[in-house]
Image: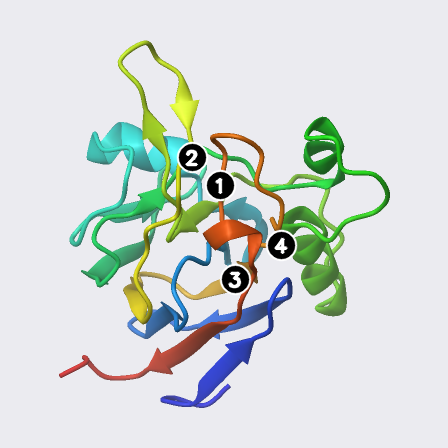
């Protein structure tokens, strides 16, 4: 992918992007209300991946903010959040959806998932992964209640919401248009169960 080229990730699909140290990646939900599951690996070692728990223990925030550094599972800096055009509506608690999650909510039969998307993208690049890392779920509206309950109410992310990240090291970033198209009571991930595309751009220079 060349710099400043816009790539469309189709609804329920995923793509991988090679982001060199110093490059910036912009992720946008053009129609709004669409969760983007974000995974990242050290380009030189697929055994090192972005870890939200290690990140928020250092940033002391359950949601990423401009200036925050995303750490790997080895607590090493991987990416930095530069801009948040998503009003802070992001999640670092939910695991990637998988077949078992849909069955838990009563869905019958096979269903696309962010876990399968990640595995398929990595296989195309020649990597067989045995662990599904915890993603950063951009544009995902979750809330921790006073009694400790975790809920995902209506997705209120506006159209053309975006985030910009800068890679600290050479990374492989995988972005999945979350296929969650069901709406269990009190648990809406995407707007009304509708799943839409995402837009991704890479930049070699600082955005103006």
Rendering coords of residue 34 (x, y %)? 46, 58
Q: Are marks 4 and 2 in contact (CB under 8 Å)?
A: no
- Which residue, given by chain and number where applicable, does mark 3 sit on? 175
Which image quadrant is residue 125 in? bottom right
Q: Evaluate whether residue 150 shows in this view.
A: yes
Q: Evaluate whether residue 43 shows in this view.
A: no
- Which residue, given by chain and number where applicable, does mark 1 sit on? 188
Q: Are marks 1 and 2 in contact (CB under 8 Å)?
A: yes
- Which residue, given by chain and number where applicable, does mark 4 sit on? 179
Which residue lies at the image location 38% right of the left edge and 64% below the top edge? 32
Q: Nearer the viewer, mark 4 or mark 1?
A: 1
Q: Is residue 8 left or right of residue 202?
A: right
Label located before the other in sequence (4 or 2)? 2
Which mark identifies residue 94? none
**SS for dot 1:** loop
Determine whether 4 is above or below 67 in the image: below
């Amino acid at each position: 992918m060349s710099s400043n080229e816009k790539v469309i990730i189709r609804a329920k699909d995923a793509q991988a992007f090679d982001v060199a140290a110093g490059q910036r990646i912009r992720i946008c939900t053009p129609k709004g209300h669409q969760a983007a599951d974000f995974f990242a690996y050290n380009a030189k070692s697929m055994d090192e991946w972005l870890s939200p728990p290690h990140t928020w223990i250092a940033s002391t925030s359950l949601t990423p903010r401009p200036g925050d550094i995303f750490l790997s599972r080895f607590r090493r800096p991987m990416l930095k959040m530069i801009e948040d055009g998503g009003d802070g509506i992001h999640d670092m608690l939910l695991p990637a959806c998988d077949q078992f999650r849909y069955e838990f909510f009563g869905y019958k039969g096979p269903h696309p998932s962010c876990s399968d998307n990640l595995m398929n993208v990595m296989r195309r690049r020649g990597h067989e992964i045995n662990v599904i890392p915890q993603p950063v779920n951009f544009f995902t509206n979750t809330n921790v209640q006073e009694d400790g309950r975790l809920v995902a109410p209506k997705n209120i992310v506006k159209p053309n919401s975006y985030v910009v990240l800068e890679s600290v090291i050479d990374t492989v970033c995988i972005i999945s248009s979350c296929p969650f198209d069901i709406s269990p009571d009190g648990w809406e991930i995407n707007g009304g169960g509708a799943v839409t595309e995402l837009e991704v751009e890479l930049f070699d220079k600082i955005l103006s």
